[in-house]
Image: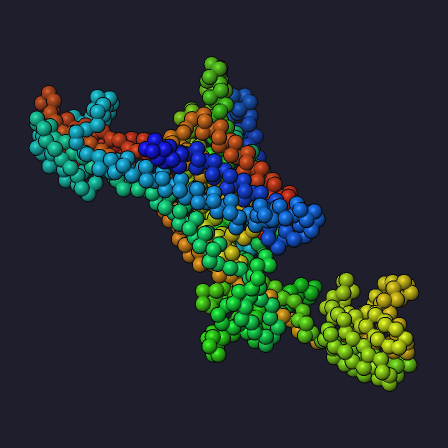
Amino acid sequence: MINLEMTMLALSLLVCTLATAGFLLSLLIKKIELAKVSTWILAIGFLFLTLNLLGAAIHSSGWDNFGSRHFLSIYAWTISGIYLGLQLQTKTRLLGAFISPFILLFLIAAVGQGSDKNLVPPEWQGWLTTFHLVLAIAGEALFVLASAAGAMFMIQNNLIKHKKPGSLGRLLPSLGDLDRINHLGLLWGFPLLTLGMIAGAVYAALVWGSLWPADPKVIWSLAVWIVYGVLLHQRLAIGWKGSRMALLSCVVFALFILSAVVIRFCFSTVHNFI
Amino acid sequence: MSSQKYSFRSFFSSVRLTIALLILIALMSVAGTFIPQQESAHEFMSRLTPQVADLLVWLQVFDIFHSYLFRVLMGLLSLNILVCSFNRIAVTRKLINAPAFPLPQGLLEKMEPDRIILADISQSDARLKLEAFLKKRFGKIRTEEKAGTAYFFGERHRFSYLGVYLVHLSILVIILGALVGSFFGFEGYLNLDEGQSAQTVELRGGKGSKPLGFAVRCDRFLVEFYENGAPKTYRSDLSFIQDGRIAKQGAILVNHPMSFEKIRFYQASYGLSSQSRALLSYTRNGVKEKNIAVSPGAVFELAQSKDTAMVLRVEEDMMGMGPAVKLSIASPRGNVQFWVFEKLEEIKKMNPQLLEQMPLFNPGIFEPYVFNLNGMEEKYRTGIQVVSDPGLPIVITGGFLLLAGLLIVFWLSNRRFWIILDQVKGKTRIRIAGKSNGKQWATEREIDLLLFNIRKEIK
């Protein structure tokens, strides 16, 4: 069973490498057809990844025994799933060139030897922990998507402003689509992350006796969550959109990455992933 | 006066204040991860000069989340949210009570041709069908008739305007819960030997002790180990005694706390009890004399002499070299202190020169006696974390309110639709217009759906 899971994971890595190469090449030679093909290839990779996760779910110790392999493959699965879902509604094939490298990175890390260890100590395993982890990962993956769309928006906007639409400009999705993806990413990501954090807080309250365990990861995530909340508030209540929103979501994303790096290298935490 | 009042209100209703406050709160929280907090700060403080340490303590740098500044920021944020919500009431009321008729200006003028249906059925026939269909679709509709033109109005999620208030309320509830917790809650520790009971707990951060109002007794403590010596599970059987009677009994394990009188008890740690006894024996001139079991502080007289030995320490694992006991022997020859290791032979194998280098480790240094440690009669004490947080249910409720509010704000928008029925050039004409406070694309899609269904209905 484990072998089957690993085969599926390896297959999805292979296919996603192909898709990423296709996306990047299509950006380079400026042919949208290649990106279309790559989207289909990515869909196959997504299928393998789904099978891998299903296998882990059926496999008795799979889900409660949450390891960094799950953590990373759920990350990859969520991002590719959302990207593919978006393709049903919008024609933003080239967004793949920005998204697929992230997916590939997560998959490479997931396949790596070092990620075989079990990260959630046995006494913490349970459905609430899994629920918390999956939701938080999904929420963060959506923020990755929102920010990738924001970055593309800025490039496209810059091209239009300087009247250099050229072939790249025609290749990139329209500003409206990108703004909408940014909006959707925030709109879905925020409630998912909120629910994930509530689940974590409930778990901490039940098990550790403190709603706010003084864990650096918890506090940093809360800080990033607040900043994302501000961003969303400005979008919904004040009506910020377009380039200002795109720029800000890139800045906040940089903060998000910074928090991940700081936590990885500066602190010891109960959330010791990757 | 009124201008002052106005500026006060406008200051507290500005979004800039909100952002500044939120960023400050985020920064303070993050700072709290870099600066050691509460107990962990002691070591750090000891490295500072007393003046600097005092200043930092006065600034509450080592307890950021309970500091006055943090509470003031929370208070300002609450005030900010309250004023903003209050200011919005008038606008929201206007939005909720917006009249269905007359149609908003410009809605008909910029209508696209694909939003118009021309049909060959009579106007009265179309009207009946249309009304029935719209009632089914929107539940309640409003109609108006003017100069041979019939207007229908239907809408969705009018109360979605209140979602904002739910979000704001939930944040206030969370802040309230946190404040209630920090003012009325406490966190402390209990260390209990088997059979021992306590009525007060030591508060965290050296803030004194707190009476519980009842007694907790540890009836039994169990610990199981893995083969490598790491603890596998440990549990304490507790009795809660109130008014001289046992009111509740049960076991706590790691991740399986128990609560009594709204105070929760968590299995946090365990350690060697001061009642643990070491099983000592000694020989005099090679002749075996006695077996004794001792605990720290015990004093015993050596056989065939008036010299007394005192047990200074009993260690379960001394510097990674296994169990050991530290003795101090007082005699007319002077005072001698030394360690007795259980695994002395193994230690000597690894370091044959040990006893010459470290006379302190020689159990035969007080001649003619040689001491042996035969093992430990280990007794553990349990470490229990005691928490009372009356704010907890409030914060959790706030969390779910926040989620509900977010879902309403994000996914429900007030969509208003007008369907106009009249006649042009002998044909019945139906036009549909819509307006929403949120996602326009969703409204457009719904209009398309309405068009599709109405076409089907009147065929």
Q: Nearer the viewer, residue B98 or B26?
A: B26
Instruction: Identify the residue at horizontal 53%, vertical 24% (top origin).
Output: A27
Q: Position of residue B442 (x, y in %)?
A: 32, 34
Residue furthest to the top = A163
Q: Position of residue B212 (x, y in %)?
A: 50, 68
* Residue A6 seen from this side: no
Q: Is residue A4 left or right of residue B246?
A: right
Q: Is residue B86 left or right of residue B254?
A: left
Q: Is residue A109 left or right of residue B164?
A: right
Quarter of the image with the C terminus of chain A is top right
Looking at the image, is B369 positioned above or below residue B419?
Answer: below
Instruction: Identify the residue at horizontal 37%, vertical 49% (top origin).
Output: B401
Instruction: Identify the residue at horizontal 45%, vertical 29% (top origin).
Output: A245
Q: Nearer the viewer, residue A51 or A236?
A: A236
Q: Nearer the viewer, residue A217 or A191?
A: A217
Instruction: Identify the residue at horizontal 55%, vertical 55% (top origin).
Output: A65
Residue B434, image quadrant: top left
Looking at the image, is B148 positioned above or below residue A110?
Answer: above
* Residue B314 seen from this side: yes
Residue B316, image quadrant: bottom right
Q: Nearer the viewer, residue A60 or B98?
A: B98
Residue B124, image quadrant: top left
Residue furthest to the front = B1
Q: Position of residue B251 (x, y in %)?
A: 53, 71
Q: Position of residue B165 (x, y in %)?
A: 34, 43
* Colour mode of the rendering: rainbow
